[in-house]
Image (cartoon, helix red, strand yellow):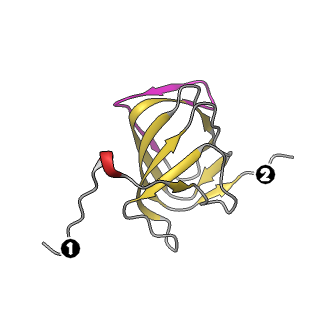
Amino acid sequence: MGKRKITKLDNLKFEPFDKYGTPINGWTWHKISFDEKTNFGSYISKLEPGTKTIPHIHSGHEEFLILDGELIDSDGTIFKKGDFVSYEPNSSHYSFTEKGCLILTFMRGKNNRINKK
């Protein structure tokens, strides 16, 4: 089975999350099948306590599963372990975590940074 890849959660190599250019403090990721050119694929993010994502808008679908910890969305909704969240194209948000979290993300399109004025 040369085309199969198995990712073991207890043996991940995380790198600084730099998908928007500059790494975001407290956010690391392990790319599973994520393609930087198409922005399609899967990755696991680890957010340390106190980490905030940048405000962004989805050009395609973004879905994620909270594997551990919890994530608080910009509208105050708290996602906990086992929650599977789907965002449709043209939706926007940011998230933060007080306790830290581990997230499995399925990306199907680019997230574009929303510049606050």
- Going 53% across and 50% down the picture, which residue do you hit? 28
Quarter where residue 85 is shown: top left
Q: Which residue in the protein does label 1 denote?
A: 3
Earlier sequence position, callout 1 versus callout 2: 1
Horizontal placement of 74 versus 100: left or right?
Answer: right
Disc 1 from disc 2: Cα separation: 40 Å
- Going 50% across and 58% down the picture, which residue do you hit? 60
Amino acid at circle 1? Lys
Amino acid at circle 2? Asn
Q: Is residue 14 above or below residue 3?
A: above
- Tags 1 and 2 touching, CB below 8 Å: no
- Image coords of residue 18 (percent x, y): 61, 59
Horizontal placement of 80 versus 100: left or right?
Answer: left
Magenta region: 72-87
Q: Nearer the viewer, residue 7 or 72?
A: 7
Mark 1 lies on a secondary structure that is: loop
Q: Nearer the viewer, residue 14 or 19?
A: 14
- Image coords of residue 47 (percent x, y): 54, 40
Q: Which residue in the protein does label 2 denote?
A: 115
Q: Is residue 65 above or below residue 33?
A: above
Please rate how many residues cluster around mark 1, counting C-alpha atoms within 10 Å: few if below 14, some from 14 to 19, many from 20.
few
- Image coords of residue 84 (percent x, y): 37, 37
- Going 49% across and 53% down the picture, which residue do you hit? 29
